Amino acid sequence: MPPNIKEFRIQKSGVGILCFIFCILNSVFLFFQPTLLAEELARQLLPLLSNPSVQGALVGISVISLPDKTPLFAYNSKELFTLASNTKLFTTAAALDCLGSSYEFKTRLYLRGNVDQEGKLHGDIIIQGGGDPNISGRFNGGKVTAILDDWAEALLKSGIKEIEGDIVADDSFFDEQWVHPEWPKDQLLSWYCAPASALSINDNCVDIILHPGRDGRAKMELEPDSSYIKISNSCRVSDNIRKSHIHICRNPASGELYIRGEIPSAAKTLRYSVPVDKPPLFLVSAFQKVLERKGIKVSGQPRLLGSEKPGQAWQLLTCTTSPMSQTVMVTNTRSQNFYAEQILKTLGAEMKGQGSFSAGLEVIREFMLKLGYEPWEYQSADGSGLCRENRFSPEMITDLLTFMYQHKEKETFISSLPVSGITGSLRKRLREPSSAGKVRAKTGYISKVCALSGYVETRGGNTLAFSILVNDFKAVPANVKEFQDSVCRVLVAYNNEKPKDIVATK
């Protein structure tokens, strides 16, 4: 658009009049140039919408030029769509805006009681959670119990050789609605439906490791090992099959897991990640196992803190921290649902004093007000996109991307997005030399929902924000993703600096 020129001081000389005319013509040119360029882009994008993969589907596209916020292409851009994991864009952006990339998740280890001269603690060990999703092997060389080992070493250094009391989990930073009520009930034993809790380990999943035994039965190991997990394993070894057939289910009353099926006798190690039903107890029972391996005897039991409040008698032994920047990176690059929900509840705990889904969503609503949207204009249900009730428009997403492009946390946000042909959920997409490394975007998929939104670096050296949402498609997901990739290829090739891009229009 032309600049808002409040005042012209026209000189009486001929030079002043010529300058005035030049300014007017230049403003007219600037006014029409984006329109002409956008029409050329539309001529390339509109034919792609006839792709058989999206026939009968609801498709929405929004493309914005940055940093001037010039709209370049819009198709159903104001319609509401189910987002799948594109929901994580709102969760992570709100976290960076409200808490910042340097925010630290903290997990504290306390002792309560006295330690005698023989190294016996007459009291309890208390682990107080702060919502940290990073207590795992992900940043510890693959060793799931690395942080728990560090805690055990802190006890040994303090002279503790025996614990008379219990290993207690203080998970009061979050509420105990660990599983969202609107997550798909038939998928709750899948790793991507892991519960959200103030105390977590190994993404709140137990890894069940199976390998052939010599007695015709499959041998089983657990990682991390935990006395809390009860498993009935009747899986057999067979010489007559080439592919494993494993079924895992949970008794809703007792929480016990049942493993049934067969594995080939020639099978290598098989690993299944299964969400646990009471995450804080899972962590403290795993810690008790670590203590025992370190030679620290525990007479009590793993348990929850209950209604007790932290007291002055608690003595801090050690504190483990991890930054929000690391957590946002995993959330978006790996599209880790568990991480997104941990962020959402942390937002609720820090900003609203309640670590719950609902309090976290209240923070998201306040963040949306910054983008110019009232609560009735969209639907927000969880932090990860597992809920089908998350409904936003492509234009809302490009407004979010524009906001974060100008934000002080811009680098953290953009670097967390998968890179075409290189990292995360885009590493196998857009791998051709012309597109690899040019697209940074968040993917999203649940049944009949496919989303891709982020940034494109164009051939002309410009940055575009885009969102491509597809709902209710009938084609296989791979074909819908290829449709999205074809749109991205056009955006990558877009060059608004070359004269040939300006075409005559009526």
Image (tube, rainbow, N blue to C red):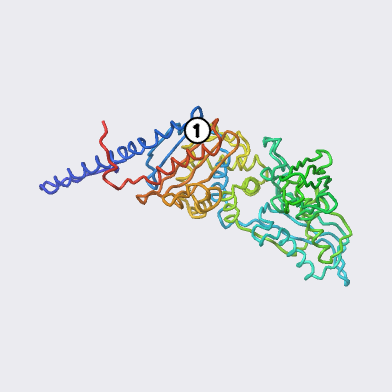
Single out the residue that lies furthest toward the bottom: 117
Q: Is residue 23 above or below residue 115?
A: above
Is 45 placed left or right of 54 in the picture?
left
Closer to the camera in the image, 354 or 150:
150
Query: In the figure, is residue 84 to the left or right of 254?
Result: left
Q: Is residue 472 visible?
A: no
Question: In the shown orientation, is residue 182 left or right of residue 366?
Answer: right
| Residue 142 percent coordinates (x, y) | 67, 59
Q: Is residue 239 above or below residue 32?
A: below
Amino acid tagged 1: Ser
Question: In the rendered image, which residue does mark 1 sit on?
Answer: 53
Is 44 rendered above or below residue 316? above
| Neighbours of disc 1 within 10 Å: few (<14), some (14-19), many (20+) | some
- Pick out the residue farthest to the front: 240
Q: Residue shown at 43%/40% (left/top)? A: 487
Q: Quadrant of residue 70?
A: top left
